[in-house]
Structures are given as structure tokens and as C-alpha cells.
Amino acid sequence: MLTFIKLGGSLITDKRIEASFRQEPTARIAQEISRARQENPDLQLIVGHGSGSFGHFAAKQYQTIAGVHTREQWRGFAEVATVASELNYLVAREFSAAGVPVWRLQPSASAISRDGVLVSLALESPRQGLENGLVPLVYGDVALDEVRGGTIISTETIFFYMAKHLPVNRILLLGEVEGVMDSAGQVIPTITPANFAAIQQYLGGSAGTDVTGGMVTKVQDMLTLAKQVSGLTIRIMDGRQPGLLFETLLGKVEPGTLISG
């Protein structure tokens, strides 16, 4: 079973403070993944993470997502790539310490988008990594864009593209919430095309700076993906609760909000 795991930027950084890495939750999650792989050696994983307070501050300053044309904007483009990579290194260090053989894959090295839509990304590396027992590690990054010159690609955008070319069974999106909440603060158990319009009003942004749209964009993107990939299950779940990811990976619990097509 191939599972994509996304660590939200708000989970592994404080998005209100520039370049603030949260080591403790990252290390705990890495340890849970390591334990799950030990219990189920057939578990295949691709891990991705948001840029949080590393990439989003620089991206907002230069408005990189809107386009890259001037010399100053291209300098900003490069700065976003640098700080996003710095966070990726910190995440990889924690996973390696936990015994998870992550392979850092830089999306911007091959990504091409067209007016914000990812249309090309090298996939041979993650395929080879999975076949040889590695855990590919990707992250929100910059990308060349055929219309905008350059732009930002979120981890969800990368997962969206990968899911159409790799045999993924489930996607787990870990954040600082138990799931998608209704007006009473209760977790909405399931989101489908039939009820999305009714629950859309509950979807706010994310705490801190987020140039990629916050919760509403993430739910919309994942709902579209669930409709396009047969049999795919997607969960928005709490990354703060110790042991929850471990139990979810082994199929012992079904937490959070299920998104299905």
C-alpha cells in the first residue's frame, strides 16, 4: 500500500514567526513512521511537508505565486527556493535520526507548471526510491511556469500530480486540527461533492502566513483529486496527537475528516 503523508507547515513550524522550526513534533512523527514501517515492512510512503514560516514569508514578500518576471522577482524566487530547502533539511535530519531512510527530492529541480497548474515533474526518482525501500521526501517549492515565469507549488499540488502517475491508495494530511470542523466545533466526518457546498462556509484560512490558500484550497484540491483517482482515500487529521499517525498507518483507527469522490 502506497501512502502519501503531508506534514502541514503549521505543524512543523510556527507560521507566525519567520524560520521557526518545531523540532519536537517533527521528531515524534518521524518516530511513529519508523515504528509503523517496522511493524509493516510492506508499507510504502512518500512524505511531503509545507514550507510554513520558512517559504511563505519570502513568497509573500515577493508575491512569487502571482508570477516572476523582473530581476528582483527572480531573486525572490531563488530566496524562496533556498529557505524551503532549509526546512526540508531540518525535517530530513529528524527522520534520519529516527531511522527512516528519507531521500530528499527537490521539486523545483524538474517541476514545470502552466499558469499555476503543475504539468511536469520527474517521477523516476520516487519510483526507484520506493522500489528500494526508501521514503521519498518532497516539499512545497518554487517552479518554472510557462505563463507566469515562475510560481509556487504547494505540497498538495505535488501530491495531486504524483497521485495521477503513482499507485497511491491514501493520502494523510496532518495539521493542527482534528479534522474539518463545523460551526459547533465538531469534526465533519466525511466531505464529498454532495456536501461540499454546505460545509464550505466553515473552511477558514490557516493561522499565520500562507500564500497557497489555507484550508479551503486544500479541501477543494483533495476533493477534486478524490474524484479523479478511483479508490483513493484522503484524510485531514490531527498531527499533534501522539500515536495517532502510527495507528492510522497500520489501519487501527480512522481519524479526522475523510474526503472521498
Image (spheres, grey):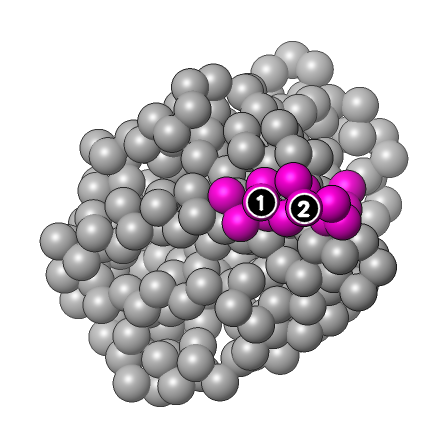
Q: What secondary structure prevails in the magenta region? A: helix
Locate residue 100, reporting x and y percent: 21, 62
Badge 1 amino acid: Arg
Secondary structure, mark 2, is helix
**Which residue lies under the disc numbered 1?**
75
Callout 2 amino acid: Arg
Which quarter of the figure has residue 21?
top left
Of residues 58 and 231, the one nearer the viewer is 58
The magenta-colored residue range is: 66-79
Is 7 placed above or below 17 here? Answer: below
Q: Is residue 91 left or right of residue 52?
A: left
Asked if residue 149 is positioned above or below residue 195 in the image, the reply reads below
Q: Tell me which corner region of the image, top left, top right, bottom left or bottom right, holds residue 40.
A: bottom left
Q: Are marks 1 and 2 in contact (CB under 8 Å)?
A: yes
- Residue projecting furthest to the top: 184
Residue at left 53%, top 57%? Answer: 171
* 72 is within the stretch colored magenta: yes
Quadrant the N terminus occupies: bottom left
Residue appearing at x 54%, y 20% in the figure? 208
Which residue is rendered at x = 27% and y = 45% of the image?
90
Q: Residue 71 has which mark? A: 2
- Can residue 183 be seen here? yes
| Res 45 visible | no
